[in-house]
Amino acid sequence: MSQFEDASIILALAPKRRKALPYLSYFLGGNPRTSYPTEQLTFQSNYFKNLDLAGRFASSSSDHDVFGFQESFNGRGRNNNAEYVTTGPIEGKRVSVTSDFGLTWHIYEKLRLYFLVSLRLVVDC
């Protein structure tokens, strides 16, 4: 279950000593909408003698919206009761870029040298 699906969680903790329960109730609900398209470019070549090249570049960007988000907490702080409610729309953006490049040099028939580079960039806005 995703953390944004409609869900109600009630926590009832029973500590060894008889004291007031620290958490009485918690609710998290909303209706998420996300689109995550991905573009990818891949190549592989053995054009050069004794040398193989391969690579990949991928880019994706997403916008997500949660309409009618609601979160409520009812519990006990250190010395007093704490209760809060958060409502309203939530929106965000995520950009992800990954890149891989590999090179194989066939030095002899049974001896090869591999070189691999991987890069990843993720930005949450």
Image: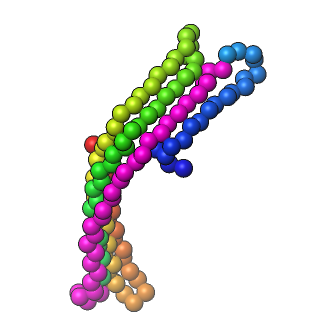
Q: Does 104 sit above or below residue 39?
A: below
Residue at x 44% of width, y 42% of height = 30
Q: Image quadrant of residue 86?
A: top left
What percent of the width, then of the height, locates residue 91?
Answer: 31, 42
Residue at x 66% of width, y 20% of height = 21
Residue at x 56% of width, y 37% of height = 8
Q: Image quadrant of residue 52?
A: bottom left
Q: Image quadrant of residue 89?
A: top left
The quarter in which the C terminus is drawn is top left
Query: Residue reaching furthest front?
Result: 68
Query: In the image, is 82 to the left or to the right of 41?
Result: right
Query: Residue reaching furthest left?
Result: 48
User: Residue 7 or 47: which is nearer the viewer?
Assistant: 7
Magenta residues span 21-50
* The magenta stretch spans residue 49: yes
Q: Does 78 sit above or below residue 105?
A: above
Q: Does 111 sit above or below residue 29?
A: below
Q: Is residue 116 visible?
A: yes
Residue at x 37% of width, y 43% of height = 66
What percent of the width, then of the height, locates residue 57?
Answer: 27, 67
What percent of the width, then of the height, locates residue 29?
Answer: 48, 39
